[in-house]
Image: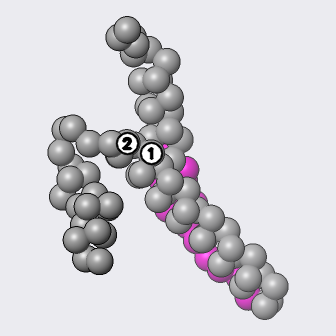
Amino acid sequence: MIKYLKNKFMAFSDIFKDSNDINEKNVVGFASFAVMVLFAAADMITGIMGKELVITDTVFNSFVIITLGSFGIDGLTKIFTKKEE
């Protein structure tokens, strides 16, 4: 069973190799988007409970820039790279 799981899933160190199947820009963008969603959910929950959740604009805007930057860079590389036939 352990041998099957090792063969099925990529090791964490394999993510940082030049030849891998995972797009690191998408991973970073998704993680940043997930943090923004958690911030929004926590803000709504504390709003329902009658308390204010104070999140500085700098922190939230940083996650927005990271998300847009990583997905934007990935989109540009897909547009401007020539496909080899």
Q: Quadrant of residue 4?
A: bottom left
For residue 28, side relative to residue 71 (left or right): left
Q: Quadrant of residue 1?
A: bottom left
For residue 24, side relative to residue 70 (left or right): left
Name the spot of residue 72 as percent of width and height, x first. Answer: 50, 33
Residues drawn in magenta: 51-66
Task: Report if residue 29 is visible in the image.
Answer: yes
For residue 17, side relative to residue 68 (left or right): left
Which residue is disc 2 drawn over?
A: 23
Above or below residue 26? Residue 44 is: below
Name the spot of residue 51 as percent of width and height, x first. Answer: 73, 88
Name the spot of residue 71 as percent of width and height, x first. Answer: 50, 39
Residue type for callout 1: Asn
Q: At 21% across and 38% down in the image, what residue appears? A: 19
Crowding near the residue tagged with mark 2, few <14, some 14–19, many ≥20 C-alpha atoms within 10 Å:
few
Q: At 50% across and 29% down in the image, what residue appears? A: 75
Above or below residue 24? Residue 74 is: above
Residue type for callout 2: Asn
Q: Which of 82 and 70 is in front in this view?
A: 82
Badge 1 vs badge 2, beta-carbon distance below 8 Å: yes
Crowding near the residue tagged with mark 1, few <14, some 14–19, many ≥20 C-alpha atoms within 10 Å:
some
Q: Give the CA separation, mark 1 to mark 2.
A: 6 Å
Task: Report if residue 12 is visible in the image.
Answer: no
Q: Which mark is residue 72?
A: none
- Residue 60 sits inside the magenta stretch: yes
Q: At 50% across and 62% down in the image, what residue appears? A: 59
- Residue 52 sits inside the magenta stretch: yes
Q: Is mark 2 on a helix, strand or loop?
A: loop
Which residue is disc 1 drawn over?
A: 26
